[in-house]
Amino acid sequence: MVQYSLQLDISFAALSDPTRRGILERLGRGDASISALAANFEMTLTGIKKHVRILEGAGLVTTEKVGRVRHCRLGSRRLDNETAWITKGAQS
């Protein structure tokens, strides 16, 4: 149960920021480079990299460097555990 709780904490912490939620929404429409995300959110490359790193740590985003460009895409996790936790709480 502790491990499950830790993953929930990491996921919800990552989702707590509106910029990170916006990044996920943007990546839901297709892959994007770090520089494209930075332009969309009017942030510095360093700022957007920090947000992407947090999302990557939660398993919500993956990145791949191709040449000099780092590409971002949605991760394989689809928030199933988080949805189950919310649903379980709503049924109590």
Image (tube, rainbow, N blue to C red):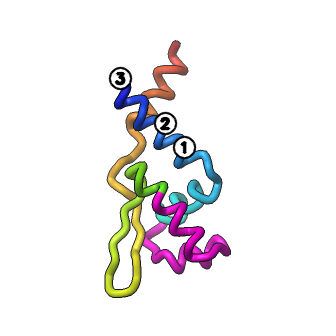
Q: Position of residue 6 (x, y in %)?
A: 42, 34
Residue for point 54% across, 20% down: 90
Total marks shown come to 3
Q: CA distance from mark 1 to mark 3?
A: 18 Å
> Dividing the image into 4 quarters, which one contains the N terminus?
top left
Magenta segment boundaries in residue numbering: 29-53
Q: Position of residue 2 (x, y in %)?
A: 37, 25
**SS state under label 3:** loop
Q: Which residue is mark 2?
A: 9
**SS state under label 2:** helix
Look at the picture and state if 42 lies above or below 59.
below
- At label 1, counting other C-alpha atoms closer than 10 Å, the crowd grade (few under 14, some 14-19, many 20 or more) is some
Q: Are marks 1 and 3 in contact (CB under 8 Å)?
A: no
- Left or right: 19 with respect to 57? right
Q: Residue 86 got which mark? A: none
- At label 2, counting other C-alpha atoms closer than 10 Å, the crowd grade (few under 14, some 14-19, many 20 or more) is some
- Left or right: 12 with respect to 41? left
Q: State the image quarter where residue 40 is shown.
A: bottom right
Q: Residue 13 got which mark? A: 1
Q: Position of residue 42 (x, y in %)?
A: 67, 75
Q: Position of residue 38 (x, y in %)?
A: 58, 75
Q: Which residue is mark 3?
A: 1
Q: CA distance from mark 2 to mark 3?
A: 12 Å
Q: Nearer the viewer, residue 44 or 75?
A: 44
Per the image, is 90 magenta? no
Disc 1 residue type (three-letter) = Ala
Q: Are marks 2 and 1 in contact (CB under 8 Å)?
A: yes
Per the image, is 48 magenta? yes
Residue for point 60% across, 46% down: 16
Disc 2 residue type (three-letter) = Asp
